[in-house]
Image (cartoon, rainbow, N blue to C red):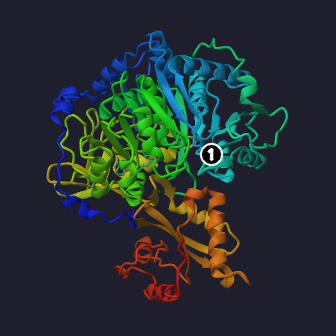
């Protein structure tokens, strides 16, 4: 933490604009003023009440929180429940089976609307198929799919069996997929021949074949959805087409009634070391908080709203706010397979108008991209159905916030800036849309039932106007229950910096009103387009290439993606013969894409003779970031060799490599 990877966002705190909810919105809001006071001192009792209100328990719980073995939390531990039953069956039993659960929009223009009753049946069939492929309660299933309805079906079919899913983002490489399958010891992999992106089919199944060829003895079967119709290599006995087995399977299926603390899923995310962490979430507490926050923060009215969260299911936002939160709440939602500019830059707004979307939840990087494309594009579409906008994934700069509200929200919608993480499972800090006078750029207030604060180096709360580290003081229902296969790393990573409280890895400030402004990571994690990437992981990928002796990666601020990956490399023996610098840079960028995935590809690779290091050998990323952001280089006095920065600068003045 001595070398924070933190963007300079101090100017945020000079933002003075306030946006009160309109009287009409406030009057009809699910959550009214007074919600914070109503919680009382006993947060666990509050959450127990929310859980009973929002979920259907098979066996009602009698205990709310057991924190006696901290930091291991047990929520609602003596209750039994099933996540898929809560997302689907109970809505059908309640007579709303004809409500549309998913409006699916494929990138090429195909679309399907699926009701709750249909989705329930498809999930039950798929659960029967998975069971016939040997999946039992507790077995892990890897899911590597584009954003098609089968992705939602696959996740819920696993949940129905009590088989934790591990979804791997379809943009990750075979290498990344392999390490995740191996770590989770998945029994089955669910994938597709491919998906559509930027107007073209891309393949997925070959990456699964390649990953399994690297050795994954736990995998017995691969269930393959036909999406693009591409030619696909086939391993007889192992591979099974979805369309050969799911349609004819029975819709009779008894959900596995699991204990509240039964694992629901594992989701890998980047940490400060090279190895991604398998974040473990369990069932009862997680479902309670995703349902409560989805209802409260987005003011969801399930019978009338059309909700659209643009996240892919490969990220936690897709888990909590595409799959579990909205479906447990009985919402109607849109899912869209592709990119915002295919076949034209108005595609999202066309979708909003087509389905009459009322609630939109997306990331600042998308908003900034639309700002760049110009407001005449959204202006060509009817966006009058929208009544609430949400933002997640990275700090939203006030200009983007105000643009979002004015251009997309017609100057009338509340905007909720929601702070949370893969580890927190659900939203933790956010305005309440009918209550809070919103401040552009600030997530503002911990939600009712959440206790978070900004503390200094000694763990003491900072006074108004102060800055420090964001912490959560009390356990919350959707908190991670550990890191898959590595219990010690869980306690070390999150609970040791400030004993007894959860350290989120983010820097934050508290303003004069006590509102929280999240500034970004203070560890070696970058945030590129709202996606978490580890500097160490990309450095490891670079040094695994023969040409590279040493590498240092920083997140440099970027107008569109928030941060961008900039790599500094020292070549082995002066570099390869007969290769131009441009070829070398491109080769290394592709190498990172192959090792991790295209999202990790550096924006720039800069070849340098040395790296700035402290006497203890730690790379001073702050100085490298000064170079990457074209700033005057800061204090270099703690360097082991203070001439290194001059050497790097003179070498680089010969030209970088940006595309
Ligand atoms: C950042 C995504 C500022 C933060 C849900 C956090 C944010 C990391 C916000 C988690 C926000 C997320 N304002 N920063 N509203 N939301 N972040 O695990 O640095 O992919 O630690 O979860 O994103 O990223 P993750």
Q: Is residue 211 visible?
A: yes
Q: Is residue 425 above or below residue 288?
A: below
**Residue 273 horizontal side relative to residue 361, left or right:** right
**Residue 327 horizontal side relative to residue 434, left or right:** right
Q: Position of residue 315 (x, y in %)?
A: 51, 43
User: Which quadrant: the C terminus?
Assistant: bottom right
Per the image, label 1 sits on a secondary structure element best described as strand
Asked if ligand 1 lies within 8 A of label 1, the reply is no
Q: Nearer the viewer, residue 75 or 659?
A: 659
**Residue 396 horizontal side relative to residue 184, left or right:** left
Residue at point 39% right, 28% down?
291
Q: Position of residue 302 (x, y in %)?
A: 37, 23
Occupied quadrant, residue 573: bottom right
Q: Position of residue 486 (x, y in %)?
A: 55, 44
Q: Is residue 346 above or below residue 88?
A: below
| Residue at the extreme front | 380
Q: Is residue 72 visible?
A: no
Q: Is residue 558 above or below residue 357?
A: below
Q: Is residue 265 above or below residue 391?
A: above
Residue at point 41% right, 47% down?
494
**Residue 649 horizontal side relative to residue 253, left or right:** left
Q: Position of residue 331 (x, y in %)?
A: 42, 25
User: Which quadrant: the N terminus?
Assistant: bottom left
Occupied quadrant, residue 502: top left
| Residue at the extreme right | 236
Total numbered circles: 1
User: Dot 1 surroundings within 10 Å: few (below 14), some, or many (20 or more)?
Assistant: some
Q: Which residue position holds label 1?
A: 196
């Amino acid at each position: 933490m001595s070398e924070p990877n933190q963007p300079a966002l101090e100017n945020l705190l000079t933002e003075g604009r306030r946006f009160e909810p309109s009287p009409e919105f406030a009057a009809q809001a699910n959550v009214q003023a007074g919600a914070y006071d109503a919680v009382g001192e006993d947060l666990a009792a509050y959450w127990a009440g929310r859980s009973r209100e929002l979920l259907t328990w098979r066996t009602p719980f009698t205990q709310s929180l057991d924190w006696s073995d901290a930091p291991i939390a047990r929520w609602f531990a003596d209750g039994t429940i099933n996540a898929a039953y809560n997302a689907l069956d109970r809505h059908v039993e309640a007579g709303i089976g004809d409500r549309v659960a998913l409006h699916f929009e494929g990138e090429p223009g195909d679309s399907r609307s699926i009701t709750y009753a249909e989705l329930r049946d498809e999930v039950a069939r798929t659960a029967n198929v998975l069971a016939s492929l040997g999946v039992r309660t507790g077995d892990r299933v890897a899911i590597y799919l584009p954003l098609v309805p089968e992705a939602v079906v696959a996740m819920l079919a696993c949940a129905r069996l009590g088989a934790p899913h591990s979804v791997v983002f379809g943009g990750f490489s075979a290498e990344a997929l392999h390490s995740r399958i191996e770590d989770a010891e998945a029994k089955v992999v669910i994938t597709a021949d491919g998906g559509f992106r930027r107007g073209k089919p891309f393949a997925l199944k070959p990456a699964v074949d390649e990953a399994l060829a690297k050795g994954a003895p736990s995998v017995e079967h691969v269930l393959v959805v036909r999406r693009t119709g591409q030619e696909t290599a086939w391993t007889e006995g192992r591979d099974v087409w979805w369309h050969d087995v799911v349609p004819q399977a029975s819709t009779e299926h008894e959900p596995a009634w699991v204990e509240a603390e039964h694992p629901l899923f594992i989701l890998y995310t980047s940490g400060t070391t090279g190895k991604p962490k398998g974040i473990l979430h369990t069932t009862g507490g997680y479902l309670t908080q995703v349902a409560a926050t989805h209802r409260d923060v987005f003011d969801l009215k399930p019978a009338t709203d059309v909700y659209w969260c643009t996240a892919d299911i490969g990220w936690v936002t897709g888990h909590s706010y595409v799959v579990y939160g909205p479906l447990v709440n009985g919402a109607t939602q849109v899912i869209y397979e592709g990119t915002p500019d295919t076949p034209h830059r108005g595609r999202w707004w066309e979708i909003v108008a087509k389905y009459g979307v009322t609630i939109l939840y997306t990331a600042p990087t998308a908003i900034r991209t639309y700002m760049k494309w110009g407001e005449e594009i959204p202006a060509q579409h009817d966006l009058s159905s929208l009544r609430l906008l949400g933002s997640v994934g990275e700090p939203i700069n006030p200009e983007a916030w105000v643009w979002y509200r004015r251009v997309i929200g017609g100057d009338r919608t509340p905007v909720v800036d929601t702070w949370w993480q893969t580890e927190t499972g659900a939203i933790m800090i956010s305005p309440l849309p009918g209550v809070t006078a919103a401040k552009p750029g600030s997530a503002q207030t911990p939600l009712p039932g959440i206790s978070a604060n900004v503390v200094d180096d000694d763990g003491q709360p900072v006074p108004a106007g102060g800055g420090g580290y964001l912490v959560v003081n009390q356990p919350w229902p959707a908190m991670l229950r550990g890191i898959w296969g590595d219990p010690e790393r869980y306690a070390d990573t999150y609970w040791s910096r400030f004993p007894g409280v959860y350290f989120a890895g983010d820097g934050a400030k508290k303003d004069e009103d006590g509102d929280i402004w999240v500034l970004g990571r203070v560890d070696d994690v970058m945030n590129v387009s709202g996606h978490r990437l580890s500097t160490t992981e990309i450095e490891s990928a670079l040094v695994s290439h023969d040409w590279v002796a040493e590498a240092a990666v920083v997140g440099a601020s970027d107008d569109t993606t928030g941060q961008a990956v900039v790599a500094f490399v020292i070549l082995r023996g002066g570099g390869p013969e007969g290769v131009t610098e441009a070829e070398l840079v491109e080769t290394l960028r592709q190498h990172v894409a192959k090792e991790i995935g295209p999202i990790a590809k550096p924006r720039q690779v800069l070849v340098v003779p040395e790296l700035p290091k402290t006497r203890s050998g730690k790379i001073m990323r702050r100085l490298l970031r000064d170079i990457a952001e074209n700033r005057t280089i800061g204090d270099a006095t703690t360097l082991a060799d203070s001439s290194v920065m001059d050497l790097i600068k003179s070498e680089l003045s010969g030209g970088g490599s940006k595309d």
